[in-house]
Amino acid sequence: MIPRRVSRIRRSGEAASMMLPVNDVYWDGFLNVLAETFEGAQQEWSYYLDQNVNAGLFATLNNFTARSASQPTPLGSSVAAHAEHVRFHLAATNAALRGETMALDWERSWDVQEVSEEAWRELRGALHDEYHELRRQVASREVWDVDEVGGAIAEVTHVAYHLAVIRQLAKFVRT
């Protein structure tokens, strides 16, 4: 397989003449860490979460009912708000990787504070869809620019942060 390449982009927007190889080992590792973040550990050991499949974002969110996900917390935003914000961020990353522009109103990404059972199910389903779209794009993309690589890496760190916050919020709400 041909190694994927990253073009070096100067901040002025001009592409540098040099292409840097990004091999499949890197992207396989990235996809493994991404899977652990959303799905929990996929093997007998883990990269950074507890060593079970229940430690990922999906299983963590499944521990909340719509009512508990909608409860106000001492930290401000509800679990539902964090879930919607993560979904919005994933959608923005996916749009950028497709070369699309998306209106990025980050303040509005926090507007969903309360959800019905149906809305909670739909939100978790939309998170699954965006996650699988990101996996598909990473697995199939051949050429990356530096900002796209950084954006993909930032997605994992962003979700990991919100996963940690949601796990802390569980201490304040009845699940």
Image (spheres, rainbow, N blue to C red):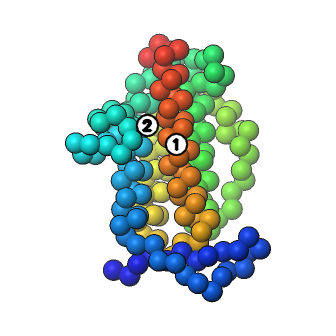
141 to 129, vertically: above or below: below
Q: Quadrant of the C terminus?
A: top left
Residue at the bottom extreme of this rendering: 17
Disc 2 is placed on an element classified as: helix
Between 17 and 99, the one lying in front of the other is 17
Badge 1 crowding class, 10 Å Cα cut-off, few under 14, some 14 to 19, many 20 or more, is: many
Q: Residue at x 34, y 34 (%)?
A: 50
Q: Quadrant of residue 30?
A: bottom left
Badge 2 crowding class, 10 Å Cα cut-off, few under 14, some 14 to 19, many 20 or more, is: many
Q: Residue at x 40, y 65 (%)?
A: 26
Residue 112 in view, yes or no: yes
28 to 63, vertically: above or below: below
Q: CA distance from mark 1 to mark 2?
A: 8 Å
Residue at the left extreme of this rendering: 44
Between 41 and 73, the one lying in front of the other is 41
Q: Label 1 sits on what residue type?
A: Val
Q: Label 2 sits on what residue type?
A: Leu
Q: Residue at x 52, y 42 (%)?
A: 159
Q: Find disc 1 in the rendering and name its residue.
A: 159
The answer to whether the residues at label 1 and label 2 have Cβ atoms under 8 Å apart is: yes
Between 33 and 139, the one lying in front of the other is 33
8 to 56, vertically: above or below: below
Residue 144, image x and y in percent? 54, 72
Disc 1 is placed on an element classified as: helix
Residue 154, image x and y in percent? 56, 52
Mark nearer the N terminus (1 vs 2): 2
Q: Residue at x 58, y 65 (%)?
A: 148
Q: Find disc 2 in the rendering and name its residue.
A: 57
Q: How many marks?
A: 2
Residue 93, image x and y in percent? 58, 56
